[in-house]
Structure formats: C-alpha cells, structure tokens
C-alpha cells in the first residue's frame, strides 16, 4: 500500500473527526442529536441572494463557463465598496482584493504561497484549525502564541523570542475570535501588531470572519482600519457567517497588493475560483439590506441569552460573548468514575450519553484544553432540552 505523504501524515489527528464519527454513530442509533458542534449557520440565506442565483443560472448561460479565477471585477468592486462603507477603509478592487472559495481555502493557500519547509508562522492557540493546519500542510513550523483568560485571549507579543520573530514570515490572528469568542475593544492591540510586524518584517493575516456577528452594540473593527496595516498585512473576509452562506463558499483576501499577488498566483495553478453565478449572488448579498442580518443577530442573541443563563444556573460559569455564534465554556470540575474529564472525553461522553454535540477545546490547539465550544446553530427551543440533558450529565 502506498503511504500518504509525510506532510499529510504530520498533521495532528483531526479531533473533530473523532466527534464526527461518534455523531454518525449516534444518528445511526436514532439518538435524538442536538448538534452544537460545527459553526455551521442554520438560518436561511437572504431571499434576494437566492433569487439572484436562480435568475442568473437560468437566464445567463454565460455564467456557466469558467469563472475569472481572482474574482469578477463586479464582486471585487462590491466588496471594496462594502469595506469603505462599513470600515471606512479604501481598497483598490484592481489589485488589493481577490475572491476565495471561502476564507478557509484562502488561508491554506496563503501558507502554501509563502512558506517553504521549516519556515515559521506565528499562530494564536487556540485557533480556527486551518490557521495551524495550513502551516503544517505547507511544511512550515508553527510557533504558538498562547491565548488565555488572563490576557483576555490576546497574544502577548512581548513573549515571542527575538530569534523566532526574526525568522517568522506569517502571523495569524482572528478577532472576533473563534473559538474563544474574544473581541478587541478598539484597534489598540492591532496597532501593537502593526508595530511588531513592521519591526520584524512579518506578514499579518487577520481572519475577519465574524466582524458582523456581534451583539449588545459592540462594533468590530477591521484590522485594515489600523494605520499602517495595509503596509504589512491582509484581511480574510467571508460571506459564510454574515449572510448564512457557509455552503456557498465565498470569501475574500483584501489588503496589500504585493502580499496578495503570490496567493493569486498560487491559486491560478490550482483552481478556477468561485462559479460566476455564485459570485453574482455574492454581489447581491453584499448589497442586501441590513435588516436581513439584524434578524439573524436577534435570533443568535436570543439563543445566546437562553443558553448562557441556563448554563450558569446549572453550575457552569460562562460570560455572554459580544460576538460570534459560539459559547466558549470552561469544563466544570467533573469527576466521573474517579476521572477528571479533559475536553475530548467531556465531548465524547456528552455526545454518547445525551446526544449533544460540542467541540472539544483541544481540537483548536493545546491551549484550548479545559474548554468546550458550543455553536448556537439550532432552533431556540432545542436549547431548553440541551440544558435539561446537560444538567443531568454534570450531576452524574
Ligand atoms: C475564524 C474562521 N475563519 C474562517 C472560517 C471559514 O470561513 P469560510 O466559510 O469562508 O471558509 C471559519 C469557519 O468557521 C472561522 O471560524
């Protein structure tokens, strides 16, 4: 049997595949599964977007041909106009914006475009897994920037050894953050990042997937709002969460044109980009009325409040997040059969005994241990059931 490549073999075991296998088993046993695992929005895509897709696909057969790989000018212009309106950031659609098949694809290929074997990337830990797996796949080395409660889940750049900083090529950050739900209050942390990146000549890749999923009057900034950010960095943006379009696979890389060019070049050897009819639907999404998003946010907030309040009543200690559709929950000291549960065990046992799916914190990196993430992606009424089951579960 021919073996898979060493590169692939080196990838840490995908903890979520363990959970996925258990989930399939639970479904096959006809267990009533409450799936709060993946960050997979359950609410509908805006109607205007669907109508646009249907009309385009039916009446404009030219859109069935190969798309323009870096994204059609109309979509690139629309996302740049949106950035101007939303963040007051000027981006040139000609060379400072490309379309991605979702930001996950773009982040993985960014690593391929920049990292040679042994090159270092600074990656927050815990993180959305492609931030570190992308580095491993490219043969690069991850230097962890630990996030923790004490630092409000922001990396301490002063702790990065000079030797590492000098060698690092890329840095990955993400606020509002998955999985910790942390946010930056303003751009002061981003200013520190720009100073650091300029000093050591590092490309900053800011993942901005959740800037629009915010609550309680919190408004998330873009990294590109920071003075000097465009000199050293790019931002990944996505339609997946904002418009409930996770399955449509539309994302963007925006920022420094010289930094984007190698990513565009790399992709040109691999893919043809997002189908044109989807790109046009993406235009409709970015031009859609704000009240579409408001409905989604109101529902996420309702679920957040219900689940958070309920968890706090049954012995958890959870803060209400200002952003994202997740709860990042510290595992209470649970002893089962004399065993303290780590995040994988907690998630496995929770799923096996209650049918509730959550994501073990260790799946996002070792500094995620001790926590689990619940996604607020199921019907409001289900959270009542989930709380009853959790109460029973933690009382043993
Ligand atoms: C931080 C972060 N970045 C990117 C993504 C993926 O986005 P996309 O659907 O655009 O690939 C996710 C999805 O959960 C995410 O949490």
Image: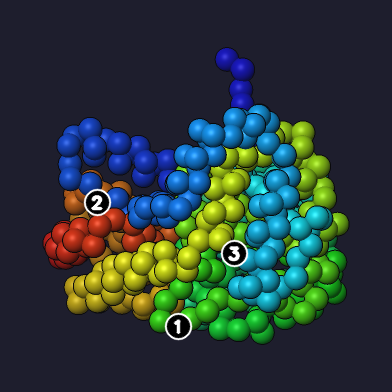
The residue to which callout 3 is attached is 208
C-alpha span from label 3 to label 1: 18 Å
Callout in the foreground (2, 3): 3
Helix, strand or loop status at disc 2: strand
What label does residue 344 carry, if any?
none
- Of the 4 image quadrants, the one containing the C terminus is bottom left
Quick check: 283 left or right of 325? right
Please provide percent x and percent y for residue 188.
66, 84
Please provide percent x and percent y for residue 208.
59, 64
Name the residue rendered at 61%, 59% in the picture: 237
Quick check: 386 left or right of 370? left
- The answer to whether any part of residue 57 appears in the image is yes
Quick check: 367 left or right of 123? left
What label does residue 217 carry, if any?
1
Quarter of the view holding residue 195: bottom right
Callout in the foreground (3, 1): 1
Name the residue rendered at 59%, 30% in the picture: 61
Looking at marks 3 and 1 on the same chain, the residue that comes earlier in the sequence is marked by 3
Q: Residue furthest top?
A: 1
């Amino acid at each position: 049997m021919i073996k898979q490549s060493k590169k692939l073999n080196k990838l840490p075991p995908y903890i979520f595949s363990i959970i996925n296998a258990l989930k399939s088993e639970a479904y096959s046993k006809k267990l009533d599964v409450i799936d709060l695992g993946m960050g997979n929005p359950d609410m509908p895509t805006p109607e205007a977007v669907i109508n646009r897709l249907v009309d385009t696909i039916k009446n404009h057969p030219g859109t069935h041909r190969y798309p323009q790989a870096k994204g059609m000018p109309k979509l690139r212009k629309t996302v740049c106009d949106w950035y101007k309106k939303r963040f007051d950031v000027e981006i040139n659609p000609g060379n400072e914006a490309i379309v991605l098949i979702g930001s996950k694809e773009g982040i993985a290929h960014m690593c391929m475009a920049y990292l040679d074997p042994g090159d270092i990337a600074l990656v927050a830990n815990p993180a959305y897994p492609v931030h570190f797996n992308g580095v491993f796949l490219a043969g690069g080395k991850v230097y962890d920037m630990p996030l923790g409660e004490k630092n409000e889940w922001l990396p301490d750049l002063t702790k990065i050894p000079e030797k590492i900083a000098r060698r690092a090529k890329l840095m990955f950050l993400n606020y509002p953050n998955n999985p910790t739900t942390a946010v930056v209050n303003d751009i002061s942390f981003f200013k520190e990042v720009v100073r650091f990146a300029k000093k050591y000549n590092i490309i900053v890749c800011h993942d901005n997937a959740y800037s629009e999923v915010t609550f309680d009057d919190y408004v998330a900034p873009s990294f590109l709002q920071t003075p000097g950010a465009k000199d050293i960095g790019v931002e990944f943006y996505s339609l997946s969460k904002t418009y409930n379009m996770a399955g449509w696979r539309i994302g963007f890389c925006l920022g420094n044109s010289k930094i984007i060019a190698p990513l565009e070049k790399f992709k040109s050897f691999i893919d043809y980009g997002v189908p044109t009819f989807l790109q046009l639907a993406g235009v409709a999404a970015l031009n859609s009325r704000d009240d579409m998003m408001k409905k989604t946010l109101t529902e996420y907030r309702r679920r957040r409040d219900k689940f958070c309040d309920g968890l706090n009543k049954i012995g958890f200690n959870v803060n209400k997040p200002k952003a994202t559709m997740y709860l990042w929950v510290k595992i209470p000291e649970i002893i089962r059969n004399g065993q303290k549960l780590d995040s994988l065990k907690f998630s496995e046992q929770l799923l096996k005994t209650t049918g509730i799916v959550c994501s073990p914190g260790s799946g996002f990196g070792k500094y995620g241990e001790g926590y689990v993430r619940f996604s607020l992606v199921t019907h409001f009424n289900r959270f009542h059931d989930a709380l009853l089951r959790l109460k029973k579960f933690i009382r043993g």
